[in-house]
């Protein structure tokens, strides 16, 4: 954010490669976070409005002011099928910036979901519609439409920087942001991790110990671990 | 609260008009909050113990001390069919003031639910009974019965003032308090809002933009919004 | 904790009597907490990852460092059928210390569940497996394996001291720790409470008031309660 | 708050008796809180901006919207010498609603201080001016002037109801609200407590035990206290 | 942050113009925040370790892992006179990452202070040295030196993005980040605001009302404000 | 805590060696925490009531119930010169359990200070008396004297277990608990750390870098640190 970033709508953004986005949609956020080298995760205070919510899309970003959702309507016009809206707020606010009318509009435009560092309402309707939202609060308190924010500028949402066009993956465990430029590379790394895990799972289910499977006994002993009776 | 408000039970309270209460029961809290001019909402830290909980009733109020639920038993006797109990606590406390035995009693008296600015327990049983509770915590920690509070005095619950007899509506989005004197007026305003929304929803689902539907392009431009490519 | 308690694994721990453990498994945490004289409860910030989760087991304890789950693998080897793992962390940390691979291993060893004063991930998989976890956070952020903690030393988890071998009971209402030495005695007291409650529930459902059933009118009057109209 | 309470300024309010106010100014908040029967205290999250701050005045109340301090200017005109401004906000907000310019104005009008359930800024200047403020946050983030609130209506500030004209006493320990109608009665009760305490303090300083001075040994024994060696 | 941003030290950074930095040092954070159009402020949970702390410098940024301050030593070498260190942490952590030894080193290198989204210790010594630190916690709990972070990459600290070379101004009211490219422009705007305020302060001190001075009576009336008696 | 630990006062406790206690009094909590192997620290939410507070004493422990300070009077009788009182509460509570009368009594008995996992009041008086208190809240809200707790049983205070007789050291950085059995050993280790630090401080003040002084360049390079220009 700088002196000249309020009141801006950027129309032409560079979205991450669609194939990379679709491949990333198959993985959980924990896997992707590991595959990225353990960066890019939003704070765990962000929670889905219903159990089992899962979404993946290219980011359309919105910067809102507390208690004001005017820019959400401006953002709606910039949504393309396969996008996911990421909304940041300039100050702490738990108001319900988003409800069933806006969700109807976002869905009609092809949005995969919403990640908002604020509150949401009409959660019963949104759940019935199957429109997934991750937020830090649920609140019936609505907002006004009076102050300009911006659309498609870089924003900080729940402690993580999101650039328009980045791939955002969200599920029960959290929300991870994959920079557009490395989306394919991360998808590859995630696939590699997942391939390795299937075999491990079978062995652990059969009673093998991670201590042996990962050959940890040596390092633990050298680190000074003592067994006592 | 004043020097002479502890240890009081007010028996004859003026409940909101039953028809107004029943009409308000048909609306969500977000709609009612807007219809009231955006006042009367409790803090979003209050959450229902199960998804889909919804209740509407005339308030029987209780003022409790931390760790003590003695007055809940006094309140039970004041409940009439169609009432909803609102419990405030004189200091921060997450103890489980309410469980399945009290719920059995409240339900037998005709209570529609409980809103408590403290903790609740036996949530599995309460869910099985279909007795809705909104609270700020769930805690197995029970309480004692040793200090006097009051019943049917004005209380502050989750940041909002509740007078006995007010209509309280609670759902997945929050809890809103409608003063008894304006209950019918608020029901009218809520109905009006809802009538308007059906049409809007259909148009948005068909792809219309809020920007056009609400004629926002002019005001946004005058406020200084710039589109860049 | 003291200077010589890091890097230790105690193999031979004294587990609570298996019969006492199995009897305690039949009660809710609210009942057990009351039966113990209202001590032994963890803080209400600990929540189950799915509704209806219930577990009871003898504690295998783990002390972890923030962001490091190495000792979880060491703990796995110490699990016996009927145990429940209790993990404490030396500092505030919401990272996801535990996911589906560790759960597969813990389950194969006979663990009844996990209580962790930190975060957990892969909650969708854990729910599908029916492996109950109580935690203070859900987070996709994984951990490293680099620093020694300990297994089966006394730990402080969510404000309560847990000794290896104690019975830990967890459900929707919270988590209660029963010292091994008094497990049978607590089971007796809990049974006694539950026997008394069935009769009360029936009377309350029939419309009786707690005021009369518990003979509270006298004490309330003597404490100064005034009824006004 | 109700449908018709926004956008109102009440000019003629009934202030508590000036003598009662001046007598209350001599006591600490802990003493007054006890004298009132342990009600009327704001939440302990409210803190003074400097050590040793102490103020007592009759309340001029303001209801603000988050991020908007327009009504503070309206309130300034209603201040009379001996008043203390109490500002509530319709939703959680830590913005800096008040700074050195407003403080200059409030002081010129005779205000004794400010209690605000939000944020404050210019705390270095306010401290230099000796203008005491109690707030829940300090923040350089300023506010706009765009939405109507009200002045001199009953407000809920930090969990306590304040009516215009009530006596508000604030010090290092907290903030207590004394309803105008009982101000003199509370001043009497506070004086009585303080008289009793001087003697006790001297005896305790000389080594007497509260156990003996308050004759607690009997009640403790009857409650079951056991001394072990 | 992306896959290739861990383990990096950028040596040649573009620092904001020294004259702009020195001019900004003369203003409070509230003034600068307004002058920037009300953006760039860190969250109000960041607090100085002593009253009256004030610092202004060009940012040397550090990204730390929870419980690990290894990179602080790497950062020390990059400090030039007039710099201010800004430390972000990849996850929530209140450990004491910084104490008197590091402060001695930073000061010797010419650092103006430290802003850290974590904890600090030895606050008595730091206060005696006059080395200002803004943090979200104070904690005696030290850290280890085991994992790589980065120095002089863009970081998110307390909700705000900081690029190496930006001007960071911190005082009792908060912390504001001025992008290097607009530092001079912001200094001009801040000076302009300050010039205007002196005159206003004098008029308010003489009893003028903001209502008249800012010509608010008309707009308030048109917005619907009603005076009642 | 177990079924038989409420309502107990243990009179004969084993206090840590007085010489070890006096030696520990010379070190800061950060140094002692490191010397103990980084265990034993209370949570950083505990803060001193005045800047510069420092205390060291052998623990007399008290277990209180929320809103009830009866046992503080029982504890007073158990205090010996050189003791420091550590008060835990069975549930979250910010009430002011302790004020100037109790402080007068504690001081007369020889107490060095108080550490309380709850609230404190009369902080102006306590500061004037020079009686140091560490608490998690300041609150004018007093307590009643109605329920039994215990004195001199092991308690959990701010996340750390304290046994009666342990040495407790508290300063601006936090509070550390040293088990009585290892007090002398920890004092030795702390002395050793402090001796080493004087020399380092001088070298850093002269401009030496930790990178060189601690020979970190090799390990950092091997860990993969890259310098870029």
Image (cartoon, coloured by chain):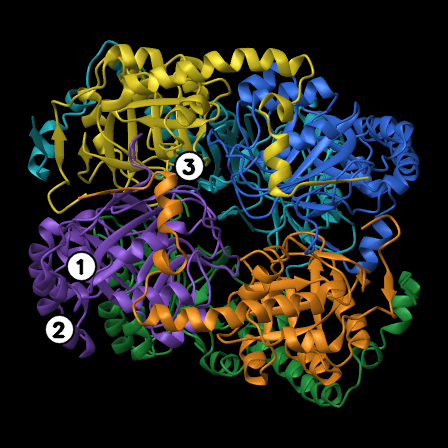
Chain colours: A blue, B yellow, C cyan, D purple, E orange, F green
What SS does tag 3 mark? loop
Residue B171 drawn above or below residue B223:
above
Using a 10 Å C-alpha cutoff, classify the residue at mark 2 as few (fewer than 14 neighbours), some (14 to 19) or many (20 or more).
few
**Residue at the spot of label 1:** D32
Separation (CA) of disc 1 from disc 3: 29 Å
Q: CA distance from mark 1 to mark 2?
A: 16 Å
Q: In the rendered image, which quarter contains the N terminus of chain C?
A: bottom right
Q: Is residue C106 visible?
A: yes
Residue E48 showing in the rendered view: no
- The residue at which mark 3 appears reads as B43
Residue E182, given in percent of the width and then of the height, sits at 72, 63
Per the image, label 1 sits on a secondary structure element best described as helix
User: Where residue A33 sits in the image (x, y, percent)?
Assistant: 79, 41
Q: Quadrant of the C terminus of chain C?
A: top left
Give the number of the disc on residue F200: none
- Packing grade of label 1 (10 A; few <14, some 14-19, many >=20) is many
Q: In the rendered image, which residue does mark 2 sit on?
A: D198
Q: Using the rendered image, report if marks 2 and 3 lie on a common chain.
A: no
* Labels 1 and 2 in the same subunit: yes
């Amino acid at each position: 954010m700088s002196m000249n970033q309020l009141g801006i709508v950027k129309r032409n953004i560079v979205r991450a490669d669609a194939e990379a986005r679709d491949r990333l949609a198959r993985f959980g956020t924990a896997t992707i976070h590991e595959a990225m080298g353990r960066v890019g995760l939003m704070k765990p205070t962000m929670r889905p409005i219903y159990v089992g919510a899962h979404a993946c899309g290219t980011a359309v970003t919105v910067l809102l002011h507390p208690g004001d959702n005017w820019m959400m309507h401006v953002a709606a016009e910039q949504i393309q099928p396969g996008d996911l809206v990421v909304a940041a707020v300039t100050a702490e606010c738990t108001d319900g910036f988003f409800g069933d009318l806006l969700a109807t509009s976002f869905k009609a435009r092809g949005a995969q979901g919403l990640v908002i560092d604020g509150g949401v309402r009409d959660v019963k309707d949104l759940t019935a519609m199957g429109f997934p939202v991750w937020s830090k609060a649920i609140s019936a308190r609505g907002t006004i439409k009076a102050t300009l924010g911006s659309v498609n500028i870089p924003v900080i949402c729940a402690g993580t920087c999101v650039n328009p066009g980045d791939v955002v993956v969200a599920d029960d465990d959290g929300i991870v942001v994959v920079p557009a430029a490395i989306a394919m590379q991360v998808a590859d790394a995630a696939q590699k991790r997942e391939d390795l895990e299937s075999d491990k799972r079978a062995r652990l289910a059969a009673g093998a110990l991670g201590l042996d499977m990962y050959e940890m006994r040596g390092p633990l002993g050298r680190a000074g671990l003592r067994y006592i009776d």
